[in-house]
Image (cartoon, grey):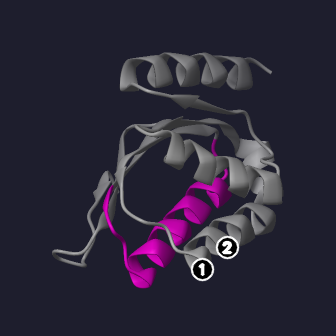
Amino acid sequence: MELVDSPTGNMGQVIFDEKDKPLMRMTYQGLCDDAEWQRHIDQMSAWARHGHDYAVIIDAREVGRVSATQRKGIVDWIDRDRQHLKTHCAGGALIFSSPVQQGLWTAIAWLTPTPIPVKIFRDLPSAEAWLRERLREKMAS
């Protein structure tokens, strides 16, 4: 599976790109309904549980509003897959375009501290370089 598109049509979507494995990419586009949000959590869980080291770029520059229920879904997923993430995920690079988005992540991280290194970036090249270094370190250990 290389690219996984959303079946939701005009609604917001999360695009998954696996073409540069083990560097995975997730791109939010617009306002996701709850079904699309759950689909994206299921995909992140599959990555965490597949038994291979990886890292993920999360491009949230175009994310729409994230409801309280959707935020809780992220918290629940981190808690449920905490050990899988710790074992297999070298890190997560979050790309945000606004302080509001950064605040949202801060609230989630406050509720459930992440088991992996996470860093916020404003651009893709910096995020990618940081993650490639995390992957090198993880694969060397």
What residue lies at 57% left-to-right and 31% top-to-bottom? 120
Per the model, the C-alpha gap separating discs 1 and 2 is 5 Å
| Residue 116 drawn at (x, y percent) | 75, 40
- Residue 111, picture quadrant: bottom right
Q: Quadrant of the N terminus?
A: bottom left
Q: What predominant SS class does the magenta segment belong to?
A: helix
- Residue 50, picture quadrant: bottom right
Q: Mark 2 highlights which residue?
A: 72
| Residue 46 drawn at (x, y percent) | 57, 63
Check the image and name the residue furthest to the bottom.
35
Residue 69 disc label: 1
**Is residue 56 positioned above or below 136 on the image?**
below
Residue 107 in sight from this viewpoint: yes
Name the amino acid type tagged 1: Thr
Instruction: Determine whether label 1 and label 2 are within 8 Å by CB.
Output: yes
Q: Is residue 13 magenta?
A: no
What residue lies at 78% left-to-right and 69% top-to-bottom? 80
**Is residue 11 positioned above or below 137 on the image?**
below
| Circle 1: element type | helix
Q: Quadrant of the C terminus?
A: top right
Q: Nearer the viewer, residue 93 or 43?
A: 93
| Residue 72 drawn at (x, y percent) | 67, 73
Q: Nearer the viewer, residue 71 or 16?
A: 71
Q: Which residues are magenta?
A: 29-52
What residue lies at 48% left-to-right and 24% top-to-bottom? 127
What residue lies at 79% left-to-right and 45% top-to-bottom? 86
* Direction from residue 125 to residue 132 in the image, left or right: right
| Circle 2: element type | helix
Residue 112 in sight from this viewpoint: no
Name the amino acid type tagged 2: Lys
